[in-house]
Amino acid sequence: MASPSEMESAPDGSRAVSDDSGAAKGPDASNASGRALTRSAGTVSIGVMVSRVLGLVREQVLAYLFSARIGLDAYYAAFRIPNLLRDMFGEGALSKAFVSTFSEIQEKEGNDAALRLVNLVLSALILVVGAFTLLGVVYADVIVGVVFPGGGFDTSLAPEASYGFASKRELTVRLTQIMFPFIFFVSLAALVMGVLNARGRFLIPALASSFFNVGSIVVGVSGYYLAPRYGYHPTMGMATGVLAGGALQLLWQLPTLFRLGYRYRLVISFRDPWLGKVMRLFGPGALIASTVQVNLLVNSIFASMGEGWLTWIMQAYRILHLPLGLIAVAVSVATLPALSRARAKADRDSFRDTFSLATRLVILFTVPATIGLLVLAPPIVRLIFEQGQFGPEDTLQVAGALRFYAVGLLSFAAIKIVTDGFYALQDIRAPLMVSFVSIASNAGLNWFFVVVLGMDHRGLALATSTTMTISVIWLWMLLRRRTEVGRLDGGRTLVTLVKTVAASVLMGVFVLGTIRFLDGSYGHALVWTRLFQVGSAIGVGVVVFVAGCKLLRVSELDQAFDALRSRR
């Protein structure tokens, strides 16, 4: 295993000069820390970008092969359940709880203790997640009945394409049974990702999700064509691809983990104090980190009321995932270890500076992305999905949901950073309270928008965005009240927000004019015209936004550019 100083190496291999406490020396320590954070976030962003693009390719394939009202509804419904557990056991709460504790034990007790913690958590994970997987397969029919009670899932399948299934609900149950073991593979992969991130390795784990998408596409498409030959529904072939992708996501990271000197040893001790700390953070934190997924699951209950609703909100959220992953996930992954180390050293200034910079970076990139999605929602959806079984009516339905999701993009992103602050402080009580209120309010808003106002699936997206906005404001206020944190540099953050909004609105005007001119001149019947429209509009938007930020002297943009140049 590497030495403690190597644990804090930058992704490019450079190391800050440090004393025995690990704190960087010199008057430029804060700036160096900021550059390291930005570089790490940039590294993660590269991997996430590849993964998100491949994820969109996977969604394109699904939209091309299956109708929204039958095959895709069943596929997305079956995947929704293990995907929620993935956030709870894998890429959400467990990863955050582990990274926070791993950073602390590494700082206080060294590498041997940190290595033992990995084995303890991995052994416990195999036992617990294995049991959950078995229960999920056995009781899939009960789970589907609870989560998707609406009449939209009682649609009968055409006899010539039923493959023995009487309804969409029966098909959903079988797909759930096939895909449930996915949670086992992805949970192990997320733990390995946490180890690598805590060791300063960001690119390899960031690329791991790409291998899930590659496996699900290659194996899934092959299964789509092979399954009917053996009397199985084509969606069952795509479901098999999900399992293959989950296994590849784990296998891709193992060589890097082994090169760091890790070797698995079966260690089971539920009384170990460090494992207990991980579990105390994980237990309530499972709900905190997966609040978005829980809210999406609540949305699914209401989405089961209509045919195609679930597919349309899932496709809209998948598009939202691209900027969300490039920005929020990248910054969050790079931020949590830095915040945890600052907390372990009781370095209040470093904690504040890291948190402030992370928040301002999120603002810098999510605000223009929000305006861009509001203006370009129909052209983007048309470019990505409108082919095969996906028609113009589907474009309008998905674009409507996307716009309502987009208004909450900043909240979706910022809540990851604020939650990281509480995880670094190893305090999950306040986020837990907010999560409970968030889930309740989301359910109430779903009922109000969909049942009372009749907003169909678009109301589900609006309810989620509204809930996330309320939650992030509340969490920010609670974090400010922590005495060991103090002020969060709110004034500087507000200035960045105002300047970024101004530059983004200007950008939106130019983007809207560009897309209208090109659509009037060339139309959008052909794929190349759609690509030309969206690409040109985005290009104009980037140029205008950067120019606006330069005029308004948005310093965070210069920091991002400096970080990119320093990687060369």
Image: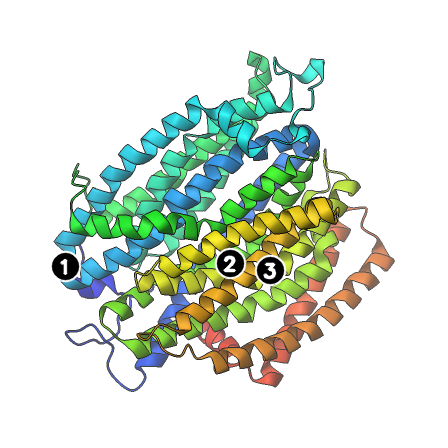
Mark 3–mark 2 CB contact (< 8 Å) = no
Disc 3 to disc 2, C-alpha distance: 16 Å
Residue 501: image location, x then y, percent = 63, 74
Q: Name the residue under label 3.
A: 408
Q: In this view, does 417 lie to the left or right of 528?
A: left
Q: Name the residue under label 1.
A: 110
Q: In which quarter of the image is the C terminus?
A: bottom left
Kind of element beneath mark 2: helix
Kind of element beneath mark 1: loop
Q: Residue at x 74, y 71 (%)?
A: 510
Outermost residue, right direction?
520
Earlier in the chain: of badge 2 and badge 1, it is 1
Kind of element beneath mark 3: loop
Position of 240 relative to 345 (above/below): above
Amino acid type of the residue tagged 3 in the rendering: Gly
Q: Can residue 567 be seen in this view?
A: no
Position of 203 relative to 489 (above/below): above
Residue 326, disc: 2
Amino acid type of the residue tagged 1 in the rendering: Gly
Q: In this view, does 109 lie to the left or right of 72?
A: left
Q: Quick one: label 2, few (<14), some, or many (20+) residues within 10 Å?
A: many
Q: Residue at x 45, y 76 (%)?
A: 562
Residue 305: image location, x then y, percent = 68, 35
Viewer-nearest residue: 8 or 412: 412
